[in-house]
Image: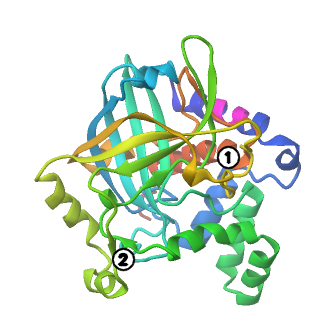
Amino acid sequence: MSLKFVVAGLLAAFVLAAGAETRAQDAPRPDQLVDALNGVFGNNPGMRAAHTKGICLTGTFTPAADAASLSKAGHFARPVPIIARFSLGGGDPKSADNAQDNVRGLAIRFDLGDGASTDLVMISAPVFFVKTPALFVELLQTLKSGDKDELKAFFEAHPESTRQNAWLTSHPVPASYAGVGYWGVHGFTFTNAAGETKLVKYKAIPGAGEAGLSPGEAKAKGPDFYAAELKDRLAKGPATFELEAIMGKEGDQTSDPTTRWDDEDNRDTAPLGKIEIAAIAPDPTCNAFSFLPANVTGGIAGPSDDPIFAARSPAYVVSQIRRSAPAPAAQ
């Protein structure tokens, strides 16, 4: 399928799913979301607009024995190859690995065979930092202005946008991309072969356990230690994560990714399978496509009332188109 048709489909999904609040004139276009990121972090040719700094990976996913009882998705029925990417949040290619207040990312593309795939995009906090695309643009434009009073006023008006930073700064700097937990901040509906449905959120738990750095240790590590640490780790064997489904309950909201479910940390969970990161891959392996939150497969459906979920994939495609464009000829 051509990229033109992928973009058209994702833009249509954005319009349909964004809801009345964000279908109005306040709803920014996908290109405006990317422009807002570039306005803060600069335009870095050939690179992603968000989660710019990262490491491409290959490995496998092996489903748990009972995963197929929750969803009929192909990767819950048999082991499949994966392409994955660890990354740092934001659009700065020189983001510091030892920054406490930056989110880490784990994105995975599951190869379902015959050219089919499905993606899972997770971050190292259980919440997103804004609840609508309009607020995404407003916050980034406020950051670009450098006006501290305006930024303070934004957070006072939108306290939900402080939750991700509060989570990150209350936890130590991860000592490794492979030593921190990751969450899918959106609610997904699983459907099994019998037509039974379950509302879930994703969580990935590091097989080696969580490992953090003290402020002094983080400072001593410097801004670029993750790549070397991961190379040394993988030389000894795969980095693993246990993928779990946090089970939803009747009445759980799916419209606001800045808000957790009630008592979410104590919810029932179900094992979905093991993620095994085996090797570092060349950057072009990951740069050839975008990991799209809305690239789901049969047996998995994203939320229909979450405007951030609806907006992310179209914006990522715009970013991909831009970074794939030939560089302008020298004058």
Q: Position of residue 254 (x, y in %)?
A: 71, 43
**Residue 116 visible to the viewer:** no
The magenta region covers 9-13
Residue 311 disc label: 1
**Residue 9 visible to the viewer:** yes
- Colouring used for the render: rainbow
Query: Looking at the image, which residue is at 74% across and 76% down?
Result: 155
Q: Quadrant of residue 94?
A: bottom left
Q: Is residue 198 magenta?
A: no
- Kind of residue indicated by mark 1: Ala
Query: Looking at the image, which residue is at 42% across and 77% down?
Result: 99
Residue 98 disc label: 2
User: For the residue labelled by badge 2, is the local secondary structure a helix, a strand or a loop?
Assistant: loop
Q: Nearer the viewer, residue 93 or 200?
A: 200
Sequence-earlier tag: 1 or 2? 2
Q: Is residue 10 magenta?
A: yes
Quadrant containing the C terminus is bottom left
**Relative to residue 298, is residue 239 depicted above or below?**
below
Q: Main secondary structure of the magenta part?
A: helix
For residue 155, side relative to residue 116 (left or right): right
For residue 128, side relative to residue 220 (left or right): right
Please tell me how crowded label 1 is: few (under 14), some (14-19), or many (20+) other residues with Cα within 10 Å: many
